[in-house]
Image (cartoon, rainbow, N blue to C red):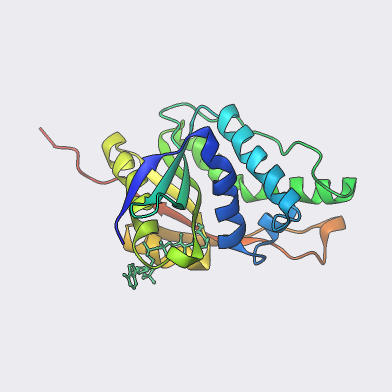
């Protein structure tokens, strides 16, 4: 299936959120808590608005898409953070999308914890790293090389900039990332202390693709 990789526009964000919702399904506590009722029309509407808000509020973020050449349909989305030597500011989870204050607090906990390894690398590298924030492919179009193409857009840029690339990988993405040079550092499991004890923890494979040794030596 021929497809093209393009930079997204603001008007792609509702579809980008729809892809997030259908590709992740209900398997991830992070997605369930941060984007409550994401499968409903209202959840999709607010989700699209939130992706748009995050896009507009973050000059270091680049949203890329894959478009089916035959139909023009957006079939994949990848959001990259390209700091280029700036330590990205840390956003808190905001808005009023939760049915109770407690659900919002829980979402904020998961959100903050999920981002800890990434934020550590942002600081330690002084923003000299490329981060794959999100990648979702329409389930009807998976396993046809779309994810790999969106991934290579960012790893090519990492090579150009001479920096590592990082990702919080799901079980689904892990093999693909490994085949493109990412190495598993460890399995991250969100700590669930105190009042969150008993709630389902989010986990991911923390993976780093070391910068390529392409520099020419004199
Ligand atoms: C993970 C994900 C992004 C991969 O996207 P994709 O478009 O299916 O990926 P690709 O087709 O480029 O490659 C994936 C696999 O399909 C294989 N593949 C590629 N083209 C193929 C083809 N024509 N026929 C069969 N297999 C193929 C690749 O070799 C790769 O295999 P492996 O990873 O099992 O070794 C996608 O499955 C997804 O959106 N999953 C749900 C959300 C998610 O978990 N995202 C990752 C967040 S970190």
Is 102 positioned to the left or the right of 70 in the image? Answer: right
Quarter of the view holding residue 218 = top left
Q: x and y percent of residue 191 in the render?
A: 71, 58
Is 165 positioned to the left or the right of 106 in the image? Answer: left
Q: Residue at x 51, y 29 (%)?
A: 87
Q: x and y percent of residue 137 in the render?
A: 47, 58
Q: x and y percent of residue 66 in the render?
A: 40, 50
Q: Residue at x 54, y 47 (%)?
A: 16
| For residue 193, above or below residue 143 | above
Q: Residue at x 79, y 64 (%)?
A: 199
Quarter of the view holding residue 178 = bottom left
| For residue 75, above or below residue 211 | below
Visible in this render: residue 112?
A: no
Give 175 or 56, whichever is nearer the viewer: 56
Q: x and y percent of residue 212 in the render?
A: 26, 46
Residue at the limit of the structure toward the front, as seen here:
71
Q: How many numbered marks have been drawn onto this rendered protein structure?
A: 0
> Where does the N terminus fall, quadrant-wise?
bottom left
Visible in this render: residue 12?
A: yes
Q: Residue at x 32, y 58 (%)?
A: 180
Quadrant holding ligand 1?
Answer: bottom left
């Amino acid at each position: 299936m021929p497809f093209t990789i393009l930079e997204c526009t603001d008007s792609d964000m509702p579809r980008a959120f729809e892809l997030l919702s259908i590709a992740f399904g209900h398997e991830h506590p992070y997605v369930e808590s941060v984007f409550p009722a994401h499968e409903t029309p209202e959840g999709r509407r607010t989700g699209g608005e939130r992706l748009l808000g995050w896009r507009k509020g973050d000059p270091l973020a680049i949203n890329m898409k894959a478009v089916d050449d035959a139909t023009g349909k957006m079939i994949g989305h990848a959001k990259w953070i390209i700091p280029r030597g700036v330590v990205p500011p840390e956003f808190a989870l905001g808005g009023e999308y939760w049915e109770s204050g407690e659900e919002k607090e829980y979402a904020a906990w998961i959100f903050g914890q999920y981002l800890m390894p990434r934020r550590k690398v942002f600081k330690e590298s002084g923003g000299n790293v490329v981060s794959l924030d999100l990648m979702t492919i329409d389930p009807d179009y998976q396993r046809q090389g779309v994810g790999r193409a969106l991934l290579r857009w960012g790893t090519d840029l990492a090579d150009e900039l001479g920096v590592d690339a990082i990702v919080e990988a799901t079980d689904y993405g892990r093999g693909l990332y490994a085949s493109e040079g990412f190495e598993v550092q460890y399995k991250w499991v969100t700590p669930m202390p105190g009042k969150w004890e008993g709630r389902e923890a989010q986990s991911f494979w923390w993976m780093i693709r070391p910068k390529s040794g392409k520099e020419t030596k004199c």
